[in-house]
Amino acid sequence: MIEAVVTDIEGTTSSLSFVKDVLFPYARARMYAFVHTHGKDPAVRAHLDEVCAEIGRSLNEEELAAQLVQWIDEDKKITPLKALQGMIWEEGYRQGDFTGHVYDDAVRNLRRWKERGIHLYVFSSGSVQAQRLLFGYSDHGDLMSLFSGYFDTAVGAKRDPAAYQKIAKVIAVTPAHILFLSDIKEELDAARTAGMQTAWLVREGALAPQADHPQARDFDAIAV
């Protein structure tokens, strides 16, 4: 019996193109100005210090912004980068520059599962702040009330079984009663190793009947 669903975002609830073609370029174009304008703000400074720690040396504002832009281009899953991107995106959402893309089938089924008493959670490489913004300012309006909690890489890497074990402990649900949804095989492998059930979203391309995890074209095809 499924008591909780933990879902990825990119390629799962939301299109990859929204993240790659809208969010990433938006943050990239504004990173230098953001670091220059807000670099001394305590919350921002803390994340910039984490960037320096990651690199192993002190960086000036220009070097910090350049490093962050490089990580964006390389699609790095680094916690301070994700946090700073989230801060930049917040302004974009609030100004109405864009809304968070969420598939119709995802919204429909998340609402249905919520009504059945299943607890819903998000686990994404994007910061918790970015997750809240995407669902709070979605194409379908504010969807934040659907979710009981959000997790990012602060809990661990998405390909590390320990992260999923930690999530299960935090939400106090036996892993066997948790369904994890993702479009990435290695993430699903990690969740299964932690004892969770899995469903592999394949929104484009052919389904593979013999795949290592049950595959589904969309949320309508997921049995919960």
Image (cartoon, rainbow, N blue to C red):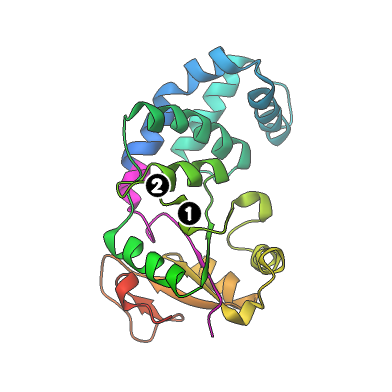
Hey, what amino acid is under mark 1?
Ser
Magenta span covers which residues?
1-20
Q: What residue is drawn where x is 35% and y is 54%?
A: 14
Evaluate whether residue 195 shows in this view.
Answer: no
Cβ–Cβ under 8 Å for marks 2 and 1: yes
Tell me if 159 is positioned left or right of 91 in this view: right
Position in image of residue 80 (x %, y %): 62, 36
Position in image of residue 93 (x %, y %): 39, 33
Q: Which residue in the protein does label 2 denote? A: 142
Distance in Å between CA atoms under marks 2 and 1: 8 Å
Residue 203 in the image: above or below residue 79: below
Tell me if 155 is positioned left or right of 201 in this view: right
Q: Nearer the viewer, residue 37 or 111?
A: 111
Which quadrant of the view contains residue 194? bottom right
Which quadrant of the view contains residue 46? top right
Evaluate whether residue 180 shows in this view.
Answer: yes
**Tag 1's secondary structure?**
helix
Q: Which residue in the protein does label 1 denote? A: 145
Q: What residue is drawn where x is 70% and y is 32%?
A: 50
Residue 48 in the image: above or below residue 162: above
